[in-house]
């Protein structure tokens, strides 16, 4: 996390407060460590960055420079990927409801993973109107013993998968090029090994004679994180090597007799794994209140800046002294500028704090700026640690441009 007061002073003076600060060098180091580990596990590997997690074009562009592909779930995200320079063949388009640009991308060589039979019907209708060959992927809904029923993908435990195969086969110019899955809330290396095994079992039973171009295992790994956060997940966070070994051993074993050419490309779609720990959020203490024996520290931000994680876990924080005088707080809650009682970002702070102090929250890279609603106030700016502007602070016009002002 960023701790250097001079850097924070300089960035806040130039870009305003609060502020997202992207630690680019650390992001790049993490990216390379992650990628190299996965590639060591199975050498025909590529990552596709999950745009929904944080689609800031600067970060998306950096991923592109580093060799990663783009994983998008809407036309908006697809347009970002195109704008940062991706070719369609380097984009994976997932999601239960896709935009028309997605199907155009599919016709142009992009990887589109069909989520359900209704969507497949639509893809068949496109194929009927086209003379050219069209290739798609299928998102599979697999059971690896997870504790919930996912709503995504084509059920592999009913006859839906056979129906999908028949629909594809009936369409002379439609071909299956890849298989995809993603299982939420299952972040252990064992669950990754289970999903790799299950996908390859399905390949063996349903697609034995098909040369698949790719198998995409989605995402859901633990990111590297501060110890205080890791402790809240049970203390020991698996390493990237643990995941690479879990998946790589299954894939490398399964394809050991195949040439590099004949093996499918393995994709994963990291989002939080890549970005979470590399954006810090700096807020300032606006006031400290004591009400009926309870202490509240009011910050110039809201829980929406930090993302949902701050309501589930205690975020890693650093206090950077910038106040003239401090007081000793016990069991204080950090609360935001909204008028919501539950706008609480951190519970149970004990220590010295004063008005003007900076609170640096770590782990605010994923589902933070992209999930911030314009509720009460527009969002703040994002910069890199080196002072490069990544996102301007939003203003009145950014939020209100789409409203109608003339009232008849
Ligand atoms: C299909 C898909 N891919 C990738 C991701 C990114 O996952 P994570 O942020 O855990 O890396 C998600 C997140 O929900 C997802 O649904």
Image (cartoon, rainbow, N blue to C red):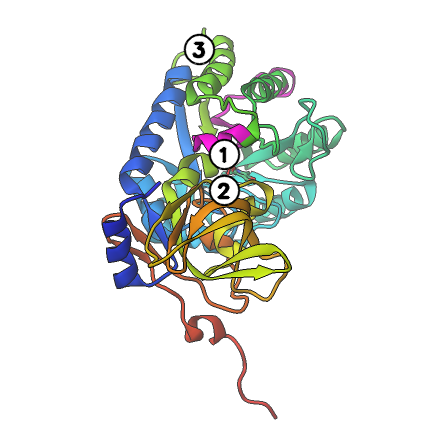
Looking at the rendering, in which quadrant would you find the N terminus?
Answer: top left
Q: Are marks 1 and 2 in contact (CB under 8 Å)?
A: yes
In the image as oriented, which residue stretches furthest toward the right? 158
Q: Give the range drawn in magenta.
A: 202-231
- Name which residue lies at 43% across and 22% down: 240
Disc 3: which residue? 258
Above or below 12: residue 214: above
Q: For the residue carrying disc 1, how many other residues have a C-alpha within 10 Å: few (<14), some (14-19), or many (20+)?
A: some
Q: Where is residue 117 in the image (x, y as percent from the top left)?
A: 69, 41
**Residue 89 image position (x, y, % from top left):** 40, 39
Secondary element type, mark 3: loop
Distance from disc 2 to disc 3, alpha carbons, whole Å, reads 46 Å
**Circle 1 is placed at which residue position?**
229
Q: Quadrant of residue 169?
A: top right
Give the residue at mark 2.
315
Residue at image position (51%, 66%) is 374
Mark identifier at residue 301: none
Instruction: Measure how far apart labels 1 and 3 are at the Cα level.
Output: 42 Å
């Amino acid at each position: 996390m960023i701790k250097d007061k001079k850097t924070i002073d300089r960035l806040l003076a130039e870009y305003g407060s609060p502020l997202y600060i992207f630690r680019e060098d650390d992001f790049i180091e993490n990216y390379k460590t992650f990628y190299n580990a996965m590639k060591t596990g199975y050498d025909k590997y590529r990552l596709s960055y999950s745009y929904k997690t944080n689609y800031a074009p600067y970060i998306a562009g950096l991923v592109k420079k580093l060799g990663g592909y783009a994983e998008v779930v809407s036309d908006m995200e697809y347009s970002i990927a195109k704008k940062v320079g991706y070719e369609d063949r380097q984009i994976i388009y997932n999601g239960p409801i896709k935009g028309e640009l997605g199907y155009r991308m599919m016709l142009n060589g992009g990887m589109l993973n069909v989520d359900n039979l209704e969507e497949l019907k639509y893809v068949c209708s496109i194929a009927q109107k086209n003379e050219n060959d069209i290739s798609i992927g299928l998102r599979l809904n697999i059971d690896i013993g997870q504790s919930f029923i996912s709503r995504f993908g084509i059920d592999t435990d009913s006859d839906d998968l056979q129906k999908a195969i028949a629909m594809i086969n009936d369409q002379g110019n439609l071909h299956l090029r890849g298989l995809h899955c993603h299982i939420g809330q299952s972040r252990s290396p064992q669950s990754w090994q289970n999903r790799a095994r299950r996908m390859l079992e399905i390949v063996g039973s349903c697609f034995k004679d098909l040369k698949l171009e790719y198998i995409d295992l989605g995402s859901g790994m633990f990111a590297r994180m501060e110890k205080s956060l890791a402790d809240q997940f049970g203390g020991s966070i698996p390493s990237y090597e643990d995941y690479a070994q879990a998946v790589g051993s299954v894939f490398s074993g399964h394809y050991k007799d195949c040439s590099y050419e004949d093996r499918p490309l393995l994709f994963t779609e990291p989002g939080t794994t890549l970005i979470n720990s590399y954006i810090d959020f700096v807020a300032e203490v606006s006031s400290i209140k004591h009400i009926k024996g309870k202490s509240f520290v009011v910050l110039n931000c809201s829980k929406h800046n930090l993302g949902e994680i701050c309501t589930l876990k205690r975020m890693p924080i650093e206090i950077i002294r910038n106040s003239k005088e401090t007081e000793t707080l016990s069991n204080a809650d950090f609360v935001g500028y909204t008028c919501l009682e539950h706008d609480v970002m951190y519970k149970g702070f004990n220590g010295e704090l004063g008005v003007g102090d900076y609170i640096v929250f770590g782990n605010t890279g994923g589902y933070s700026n992209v999930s911030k609603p314009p509720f009460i106030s527009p969002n703040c700016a994002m910069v890199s640690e080196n002072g490069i502007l990544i996102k301007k602070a939003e203003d009145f016009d950014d939020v209100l441009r789409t409203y109608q002002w003339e009232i008849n």
